[in-house]
Image: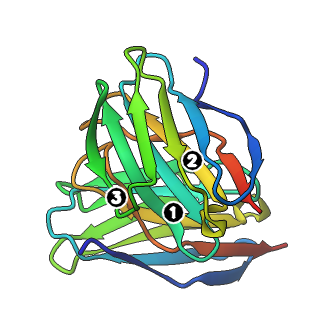
Amino acid sequence: KAGVTQTPRYLIKTRGQQVTLSCSPISGHRSVSWYQQTPGQGLQFLFEYFSETQRNKGNFPGRFSGRQFSNSRSEMNVSTLELGDSALYLCASSLQRAGNEQFFGPGTRLTVL
Amino acid sequence: GENVEQHPSTLSVQEGDSAVIKCTYSDSASNYFPWYKQELGKRPQLIIDIRSNVGEKKDQRIAVTLNKTAKHFSLHITETQPEDSAVYFCAASRSQGGKLIFGQGTELSVKP
């Protein structure tokens, strides 16, 4: 079974731009969670989607948003990029919202110049 | 608020020794505690997890213990090998899947 995939793997943007990241979960998995990883703040939860509905949200500004499609694929969007948004963005999928372990994708490395 | 504290931040051991990493969580409603291993440039990989109705779980050289009263859980690695060198993260969640609150990570170095 294929693992979690994320596209693109690397992105370079400038301040003020917006970006969209994509995550395809393991086949059959319905829950997708997003995390931001930085050297200073570690791994921080952004949001979780299950059956196209946002079920949990972390403490990030409204510039960070996401959605999930009927095939469980998920996208996250960051608008008005800031230098501090430079990070590795990881998504993780699980079989259902409450019941199974999360499996991570390889991440998207975002650099904001 | 929800918080997970992890210690130590770095740990260096000799090959064959044991390594112990400790985490404390603040949310008493947490009931699922996974541990992830992240090698340099790679994704976090789940190595073991424990649920709140269990006090200890073991998988070959890796074991995890949970003390719900103290809100404390630990990862134990025995007979360490150089390939165990990585950053280890503990996490806590109110449910399996969903929102994981991570500790700050422990960089483990196993010297041959």
Q: Residues within 10 Å of mark 3 (few under 14, many from 20)?
A: some
Quadrant housing the N terminus of chain A: top right
Nearest the eye: B73 or B99: B99
| Chain letter, disc 2 residue | A
Residue indicated by mark 2: A90
Q: Earlier in the sequence, mark 1 or mark 2?
A: 1
Chain for mark 1? A
**Secondary structure type for disc 3:** loop
User: Same chain, marks 3 and 2?
Assistant: yes
* Farthest front residue in view: A16
The residue sitting at 37% across, 15% down in the picture is A70
| Residue A2 figure quarter | top right
Q: CA distance from mark 1 to mark 2?
A: 9 Å
Q: Residue at x 45, y 34 (%)?
A: A93
Asked if residue A34 can be seen in this view, the reply is yes
A2 to the left or right of A91? right
The disc placed on residue A58 is 3
| Badge 2 element | strand
Q: Work out whether residue B79 can be spotted.
A: no
The residue tagged 1 is: A43
- Residue B112, located in which quarter of the rendered image? bottom right
Q: Earlier in the sequence, mark 3 or mark 2?
A: 3
> CA–CA distance between discs 3 and 1?
12 Å
Identify the amino acid type marked 2.
Answer: Leu
In-image side of B67 versus B99 (left or right): left
Residue B104: image tag: none
Q: Residue at x 20, y 81 (%)?
A: B70
